[in-house]
Image: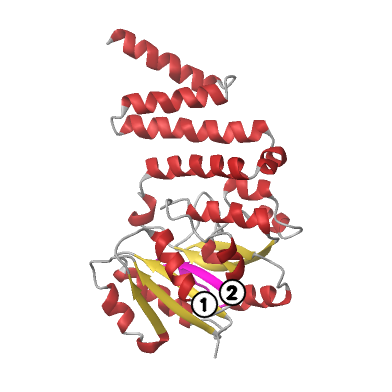
Amino acid sequence: MIPAVSVVIATYNRAKLLGATLDSIFGQKFSDFEVIVVDDGSTDETARVVGAYGPRVQYLYQQNHGPSAARNLGVRRAQAEWISIQDSDDLCLPNHLDVLHGYAKSHPQLGMVFANGEYLGGPVHNRETIIPQAKSRRLAGGPVRLVDLFDKSVVRLQAALIAKKCYAEIGGHDERLRICMDLDLAFRLWACYPMAYLDQVVFSYRRHEGNISADQERRLSENIRVIEKLLRENPKAGEILGAGRIQRRLAYRYYRLAKTRLKHGKASEARAALNSAARLAPLNAKYRLYQLQWLATRARD
């Protein structure tokens, strides 16, 4: 019998956390789902952890090609019309698929429906939910706009259901990306299909050393690439967002990239990134000040 939802989990060396994630999935109210774990070349006890769940979990192994490739493999094997992509370190709440699939079932035209998440262990940035409560209520009041996806990257795929046919039609995750692939996927889904947001909390985000200290330089570089890709592939997106909004976001990303590169001793690459920030936002005094400080330091040297 074909399940209503396929839960796809890409994992790499997270054996110590994966069991809790799987337990949270099987502990939901909703039960009409299959679980597919794609092991992206782990060298720890991942296979043993998954094996303890027996036939309840389909286990796939591939050489390390990154999370995007692992997710694409899992979705190709999925039987259901709706896909739930979960990280191997977060937790589903008991209402997770019950809420999302209940809405998706009555709105089959959607490419994606998503909701909010909470921080496991207490508030972060002085809030308990990933999307602030006031913004969450506003998002649920109408169709999801490009500006909502662009400004704060509100989509967390752990809180989403994606129509498999839509995922396939846009080509799935971009396998060249390893960190910002979810934002890229959300942009491409937005360009082709309607989306909906629900003002409910459906998963818990676990903060730990493995995700807090992820490669910040890659994260920022990929974020810039994803924005440039959106504008290149969808000229309409530039008109919707406006040049000022785009330039401010790109400039800030380049500024943070410059600081990250400088911290790691990549002076010439840092300067190139800072010059890009100043070129995009020539009236921003902070970027110009850093440029002047840089020139003064080089003059003293």
Outermost residue toward the bottom in this view: 1
Figure check: 173 above or below 203: above
Q: Position of residue 85 (x, y in %)?
A: 50, 68
Front residue of 73/20: it is 73
Q: CA distance from mark 2 to mark 1?
A: 6 Å
229 inside magenta stretch: no
Q: Residues within 10 Å of mark 2 (few under 14, many from 20)?
A: many
Q: Which residues are magenta?
A: 82-96
Front residue of 274/300: it is 274
Q: Position of residue 99 (x, y in %)?
A: 63, 75
Residue under numbered circle 2: 82
The disc labelled 2 sits on which kind of residue?
Trp
**Residue at x-position 62% and y-position 64%:** 114
Q: Which mark is residue 192?
A: none
Is mark 2 in CB contact (under 8 Å) with mark 1?
A: yes
Counting residues from the N terminus, which is met first, the one under dot 2 or under dot 1? 1
**Residue at x-position 52% and y-position 22%:** 278
Residue 133 sits in quarter: bottom right
Residue under numbered circle 1: 6
Q: Secondary structure at mark 1?
A: strand
